[in-house]
Amino acid sequence: MNDHDEDATAEQLPARERQRLQTSRLIQYLLLQALIVAACIFALRQSLPEPPAEYQVTAFRLTESGTERAVTLPYFSPLRHAMNDPPRFAGQFIRPPNDATRAWSVFLPRFTNGVEVTVNGVVILDSRRDPAANRPDRNTAQIAVIPASVLHDGANDVSIRLFIWGPISGFLDRIWVGPDELLRPSYNLRTLIFVTLPVVFSSWQAILAVILGIMWVMRRHEPAYGVLAAAMAVGVGQAFLQTPMGETPFSRLNVILISSAPIESGLVLTFALLFSGWKWQRYGWIIFIPGMLLALAGLFGNQATVRALFLYLAVPMVGVSLLIMAVVTAHSMLKRWNVASLLLGCAVTIMLTCWVVDLLSVFQMMPNRIFTARLSYSVMLVAIGAGLTWRFARALNQVDGFAGRLVTQVREAEEKLKASFVREEERARAAALARERTRLMRDLHDGLGGQLVSIVALSERGNGSAGIGDAARAALKDLRLVIDSMDDIGGDLMLALGSWRERAMAQLRPHDIALDWRAVTAQGLPVHPELRPWHVIQIVRLLDEAVTNAAKHANARRITVRIETLAGADGLDRGCITVEDDGKGFEIAADGAAAGAIKAARGLRNMRSRAARCGAELELNSCAQGTDQGTRVRLTLPHRFPDSDGAAG
Amino acid sequence: MNSLNDEPKVEAITVVLVEDDAPTLWRLQDALTKAGYQVRAAGTLTEARACLAQGAPRVLLTDLQLPDGHGVDLIRETRQRFPDTEIMVISILGDEESVISAITVGATGYLLKDAFPTDIAATVRDLVAGHSPISASIARFIVRRTQNTPEPPPGPVLNTAKLTPREIDILWGIAKGFSYAEIASHLGLSRQTVPGHIKNIYRKLEVHTRGEAVFEAVQQGLIKL
């Protein structure tokens, strides 16, 4: 629960202003606490409604340690450690003769620790048989109907034996003997306030223990929840266990649990410290020393020792814890000025007031002996419940606010991202377009440009109309190639070669050269997903060059194009295109260039450069004589086409 | 484009030739006239309509970009008025954009403007003989459209839904440069049946009416109702 949301308004102010704010806060807070203390004292001074005074019996003769004297109730008896020979109060009451028809009762509003009531020599009540009545901190009232046969008109004897077993001195409040119907409302009210209500609060405490336990299990980094859950659990154990009357092994454990108030208050104090932002230190275990001592006493000592120690360890421990908590919560309130601290602070003040009043009562400085500290603990429980709910609601609001902020931020980020994505996309598109334009320009320059220049040259010479036609036709052919290569062929080079075959046939038909098309493997060529238009252009131009050479320079009659897929030694398939003619062939020099015409040499150089750009291998064979006469251009495609036009730059 | 180098048979076959560039028109007209065809030449859409008014020609050869309109309209009209007339597009580059849009209104293939005269005559002769020439690039365009792509490819709308797997196989063969004989042997067909399949392909790619066009667009998800 140690949320460090220091009050923002206080943080922003300059030191002087902040001090003034703190002072004003402190005064406000202290005034409120003073008001609470006053209200508490006022409320505690109010005595509970009592039965009619005419039935009150206060004059008794007390027999104690063999001596007899007259006393008036309420009576404080000194602390005794022996259970035998308890003080005995003997008195009388008058029943009017006309009252015989009504049932009469004896009502004892308050006593410590146990009573045995005898009317006319007949025992009618022994409070020790009621476990709840044995707890001196419970303020349990007792009522007993006097059997009609025991009563008689006129004076009746009533005697009370008061059992005292510590840790506090004995006490017997005034008693009432009268018609049951007149006494019982008062008894019922006391039972409601001092018996039923604590049970209800203990149930609430049990629920809180479970809630806080779950909270701690789910949020291990907030040990305050775990500590408070432990405190609640100890409190529940304390409330539902009875005071042991005999000595059994189980009763020892019982004693430890019943006298666990110092452990409980230590846990609550630890919670308050953690809640106010204190970090657990090693010396923190000091808080639990009184509780541990008491537990050890319960385990190894006898009940009397425990009771004696309880008074000296537990009661001061509770008080000291409350004092520390009051200071800590006041500090926390000043620092944070929030609802949780305020609730806790008020609860602590109420408890502290009740504790002081109880202490006065124990030392017989109060006219009555009603213990309220334990009951006022329920205020603390309510404060804890309210504080938890407040925190939970605030956390939900924060989550809502956070979610809202997050939605806004995500939307903003999304918009930014979208904008940058659009920008990026545009840049990528522009880059792709620029690349494509560059490529297209180079392709058109390589082919169409040269052909148009030669058309111009031919037309200027003015005599070669046939030449102009050829050049223009070549230009158109190249234009078609460029446009064709732009088409998406899905990496299947065969689709590009299909168009090329048509164009080559149209080109060769006037020369009466047959084009023999042989797809040796059924598939043709392997599919290359990485195939790009510029690869296609290079390959098709290379093949064009081979066919044009065969047609123009070799006087070939037949050109054979073989298309096949070769399984390489490395297990990778490679496409292979072979263009073979039956022309006159030429000699190939040592450097791989043709020894013949300059034009043919340049053609071969072009072919090599194109093959290199695509990562393909070019193999040239030419034979001028014999049966093998002709030229063979063998193009082995790479397994994977290169991404960039490396060789050409 | 499987021309046979037979002697051109001279018949009184009427050809309406629509081309706005005069030198190109002369060139094509010369080639056809020399091959014995009776040619009616037109330079504009209006002139072409006047030619068609004289009666049904056997063949219509038309350019697409005309000074007073688009050849596609002329093809559609001719197809509706004279179902028996063979129609072919004259194209500079044989680019798919224009040729496919002409095919969907009833054209059968295209003729390149710079084709050799003998090739021009041979193409028209094959057309009249009932053959439907289809180029590798057009076949390629069609088969690429039969493949499923996440977004509609650019270019003219083409409904390939009616094509049978066999017809698509034939188109693949043509696109990859195989001859009819090679395709027939690969697919286990008779060589003679291949031209018939190609004719069917052309007919199936035709969009006959506006209503059918809308229906097919809906079928292909191009229009959402």
Image: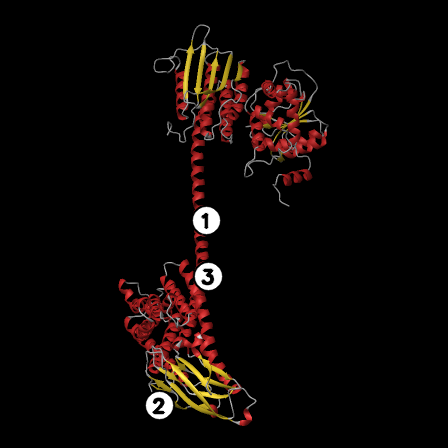
Q: How far across and down, in percent of the image, does residue A207 sit?
A: 45, 66
Q: Chain of mark 1?
A: A
Determine which quarter of the picture holds residue A61.
bottom left
Distance of label 3 from label 1 (alpha carbons)? 26 Å
Q: Which label was assigned to residue A400?
A: 3
Task: Please tell me if label 1 and label 2 are on a single chain.
Answer: yes
Nearer the observer, disc 2 or disc 3?
Answer: 2
Whether residue B41 appears in this view of the structure is no
Question: Which residue is identified by label 1?
Answer: A418
Residue drawn at (69%, 39%) of the image: B211
Nearer the observer, disc 1 or disc 2?
Answer: 2
Name, please, the residue furthest toward the right. Answer: B55
Residue drawn at (50%, 17%) of the image: A561
Q: Is residue A446 above or below residue A632?
A: below
Whether residue A250 appears in this view of the structure is yes
Q: Could you tell me the amino acid type at mark 3?
A: Asp
Nearest the viewer among B118 and A483 is: A483
Q: In this image, A231 relative to A472: left or right?
A: left
